[in-house]
Amino acid sequence: MAFKPCSRAARLTAAIFFSLLLSGVMQGQSAGQVLTVTVPPQLSGARNSVLAAPISVQLRKGYHVNSNAPDDEYLIPLALSWDAAPLELEQIIYPKASQAKFSFSEKMLSVYAGTFEILSRFRVPASAPAGQRVISGKLRYQACNDTMCLPPRTVEVRLPVEIRPN
Amino acid sequence: MLVNPKAAALLCVSFCFCLFAAACSRSSSRGVESESAAVKPAGERRLAPDFTLKDSNGHPVKLSDYRGKVVLLNFWATWCGPCQIEIPWFIEFEKSHKDQGFAVLGVSMDEEGWEVVRPFAERMGVNYRILLGTETVAQQYGGVDSLPTTFLVDREGRIAAAHVGLTDRKEFEDGIQALLAGR
């Protein structure tokens, strides 16, 4: 069976069809997901060194998450945790929170919005085996906008690490 | 410009299909948001999915037990700020309309359960029945992706209105009054 070359109209139809279909798929993927995380492509360090991993967090416009130290015991804090082995987690530094007032709250709330960075510092132990590793972390958050809240979610974070011999 | 009629027809059909698919995708991703916020005419209401959930005393509570009453069914959580604005309204509704055949049911979606829900409800002075929600019940009600989500159920057990997000108090009041009046 021989294939005829597509007409211009047919090609146009296909382009419209797939672009609309793709936009629908992307919209479906983003429904309910208001936070994205960007990690460095790779950390690299020698034994006995300290590695700093800046984790960038982007929130959809209009949404906020509670800071890592919210003022109310019932609010769910933003929390990053690591399963760092063979590295040793030294410190997690959260950014300074904003104090913001929302229509649903009589008092100011301690929140993060927009794009912000969480810095994790790891020590490479002297006994760490040299080579490539991937360490994993979890970022738990609970997001709201001015009129509604989404359930708490946990995002898996994977961070490639290269441990160099001294 | 000459256009092949077959290709033009195909273009039209594809475009209509894409618009339809995009509309379907939007409404499904928004879940219960596609429900009308205002009280629907009786003929357009669908039966509220029945469920059995436990209250703070461990007693099973069925929604269908409330048949004959107007029910405000509120999905909420302790960590939900907008929910805390509505709860005092619901306390007042329960107080002022209870004798007219009205009840509020608060379905908590807290994963931690009664350990957090009980003290929170005491702090807020909740006077209506609180139930612990499950994912299954949430799915029956369209996923309940956003809180608060509130349904007004008429005396025949049908969903008359759905509200997603913090809603104007008057909208609730008007809906309850209309349903109590049998509209």
Image (tube, rainbow, N blue to C red):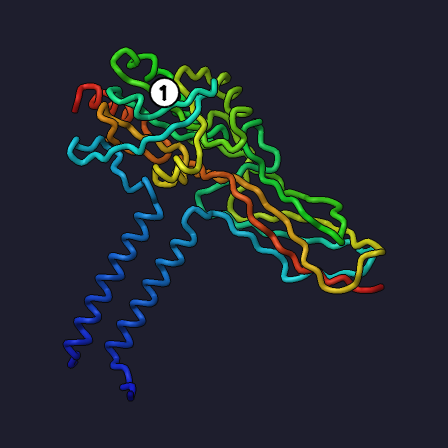
Is A106 or B111 nearer to us in this picture? B111
Residue B139 position (above or below residue B93) = below
Q: Quadrant of residue B144?
A: top left
Farthest residue in the bottom direction? A2
User: Could you tell whether B45 is left or right of A152 in the image?
Assistant: left
Horizontal and vertical percent for residue B142? Answer: 35, 40
Across and down, in percent, residue A82 comes to 67, 47
Q: Could you tell me the amino acid type at mark 1?
A: Trp
- The quarter of the image holding the N terminus of chain A is bottom left
Where B152 sits versus A133, above or below? above
Q: Which residue is mark 1?
A: B89
Residue B160's x, y, as percent? 24, 31
Give the number of callouts: 1
| Residue at horizontal 34 percent and vertical 16 percent from the top | B94
The kind of secondary structure element at disc 1 is helix
Q: Nearer the viewer, residue B75 or B170?
A: B75
Q: Chain of mark 1?
A: B
From the viewer's perspective, is B178 left or right of A161? left
Question: For this rendering, which residue is in front, B82 or B11?
Answer: B11
Q: Around disc 1, counting alpha carbons within 10 Å, would you say few (fewer than 14), some (14 to 19), or many (20 or more)?
A: some
Task: Give the vertical position of B165 relative to A62 (above or below).
Answer: above
Quadrant housing residue B100: top left
Q: Nearer the viewer, residue A52 or B155?
A: B155
Q: Residue at x 32, y 28 (%)?
A: B168
Residue shown at 78% from the left, 53% from the top: A50
Q: Quadrant of the C terminus of chain A?
A: bottom right
Q: Position of residue A64 (x, y in %)?
A: 49, 40
